[in-house]
Image (tube, coloured by chain):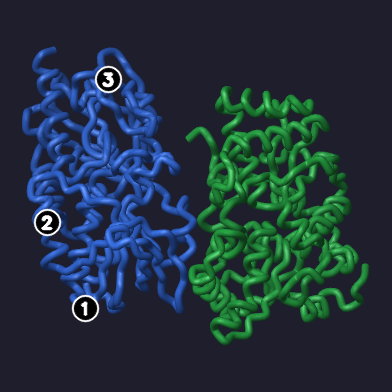
Amino acid sequence: MQVKRVVQPENKIPEVPQSVFLFRSCTGSLEYPGTENAVRETLRILGIEAVMDPDQTCCSGYLLTCSAHKPEVSLAVTARNLALVEQKNLDTYTFCNGCYGYLSELSHILLHNPAYLSMANDLVARWGYRYEGRTKIFHVQEMWYRLRERIAGKIVRPLKGLRVGVHYGCHYLAKQYGILDDGGYPTFHEELIELMGGTPVFYKERQLCCGYAVGRGFTHREEIVQPHLYKKFRSAREAGVELMTTVCPGCNVALDREQPNLNRRYGEDFRIAVIDLAQLIALAIGVLVQKLGFEANTMPLDDILKKIAPEKGS
Amino acid sequence: MDDRVKKVLVIGGGPAGMEAALKIGQAGFRAVLVEREPDLGGTLRKLVSSFPRWENPADLVGVKVQMLEGNRNIERLTSTAVLTAERFERGFRVTLKHLNNGGSREIRADAVILATGFDLMDASVYGEYGYGIYPNVINSLEFEDRLRGWKEGAESIPKGIAFFKCVGSRDRSKGFPYCSKICCMYTAKQAGLVKDLFPGAKVYVFYMDYRAAGKGYEEFVRDVIEKKHVRYVRGRPAKVLPEKGRLLVRAEDTLMGIPVEVVVDTVVLASAVVPRADTRALAKMLGALTDEYGFIEPLPYTAVRSGERVFFAGGCGFACETQGALQQGAAAAAEVIAFFNKS
């Protein structure tokens, strides 16, 4: 095999950059504005500048998946967005598994098919862009794991044994090659939870998909997503999960917003808060709670905040 | 013994190596049979029953060992490994190391037969199956030990066992695009044995398709399915999860087009057959060819020859069943004998 399946974070990110381009996520920034904030604050505290650009658009992946437009359109969108990053000579860091997956995949297609690349570049050249393939695509979770020791040194609000069930999300793990862990049985988020003083819970259905693909948007099918998530949440509750973390706003939406529907359909009382891993790290390293936007969550975090951040400030 | 009689070094004392040494000795040439383990028999020695005739492998090993012992031309060196080997004059100069007392000795050989056997791929590359995470997810060779324990009266009675075929094999993403050839048959054998021992146990075999190409093979698998009532499910399992001390297997029955879940006590992974890790280095020292995976490669238009005075037999060339190992052992011996008589 030419491509390694599991890459050590020190090999994936040999030198920690001073600045990175932070690729905004539509779902993240619309549904949970606190996530973007948490990522930026965490990067700042870890000593990395997050550069952003208002000209960056949606990665267009969701629309591509739903066949809402032709794939060629997404190729051009990708070329434009990444050209924007290349103008700044930075690497691209996403905080959404979807953006990560689509940018990786679409840039791979562009860079391995000269005809597609010139087609996309011809189009975006009208606005002065040109994609060359210099910027590398990362997910911020890779940076968290790369800087796990730095994070450990900055903990001011230890998680006090909080029982956290992590959710990795299919679109990161399904890449299979060049990711930080075994896609079939990943554990690096659990390591981060442990390092922050939490108790990682390996609940039975921890790798079950979030159901976003059939739970949200115009592909919504509740008769499929609800039994599916019911299985996941029953298993999480059985194992005593107090908080779930995600690294993908899509997963976060699916897991957080669907719980009231499950409660209605099955006469249950699920109240498991779901937040982004970056929000939890930010919390642990002392970012002001007000900056993390937990008001946007459907499932309240009151009990968790009472436990970890009783002072509600830094 | 007459020093002018030509001598062959046979590396590996499994069925292929034993058969090769035996035929060479019977033909009047000298053979030195080197085996790393304290006993001869190789992988065959670890197996319980066989296909397609449910014979006891221990009987076969016993007969072969007895014949080897009775032949003055054959020297058997167990607990011994090849340390170094090089071409010397019109043959080889090889240093052997005794693994127990650490002593080494040098021998000369006019030809070498490689019969170093095979291994199973490390199944932990499939994190989703939990090999190395859950103690009751084991590979097929480890399962042979369980079978032996049960045959000898071990008390734990399994209620359910699931076999996964093609774990690694035919999976390009794991770097093993080839079919490991023997798994379909030994899995059927193992599943059938479980049903013989514990008729009440639920036994599932998850398969992509089954390849039973050999005399009596198709009938064997059919019997296991139809007469022993092993449940064959066509579909690659997605996941193994812990479930109240047992194991939950989540898969798709692709013939029915439905997701299935079964709860079992043990999951047996038929891992891809791979060459032994040190075979490639050994081949290099001896001037034999290896392929991209590390299996010994034959010279063009030959079956068991891999270089000047270097021959091979059995699992080190590619996955093969006991019958195949014996056939190749005999063929390698025939090549050597013909070569000696010609030169």
Q: Residue B322: x percent and y percent?
A: 17, 46
- Furthest toward the bottom, the residue is A267
In the figure, the shade used to draw chain B is blue
| Residue at figure coordinates x 18%, y 43% from the top left | B15
| Left or right side of B327 for B275 | right
Q: In the rendered image of this protein, which colour is used for chain A? A: green
Q: Comparing marks 3 and 2, which lies closer to the viewer? A: 2
Residue at (78% x, 81% y) in the render: A303
* Tag 3: amino acid: Gly
* Residue marked by disc 2: B220
Left-right relation of B157 to B281: left
Q: Earlier in the sequence, mark 1 or mark 3?
A: 1
The answer to whether dots 1 and 2 both sit on one chain is yes
- For the point 77% across and 65% down, which residue is it? A280
The label on residue B307 is 3
Say which element carries label 1. loop
- Kind of residue sitting beneath label 1: Gly
What label does residue B200 carry, if any? 1
Label 1 and label 3: CA atoms lie apart by 53 Å
- Please state, as top left, top right, bottom left or bottom right, where the C terminus of chain A lies in the image: bottom right
Q: Mark 1, residues whose alpha carbon is within 10 Å: few (<14), some, or many (≥20)?
A: few
Q: Chain of mark 3?
A: B
Marks 1/3 in contact by CB < 8 Å: the verdict is no
Q: Horizontal and vertical percent for residue B211?
A: 20, 47
Residue at image position (19%, 22%) is B302
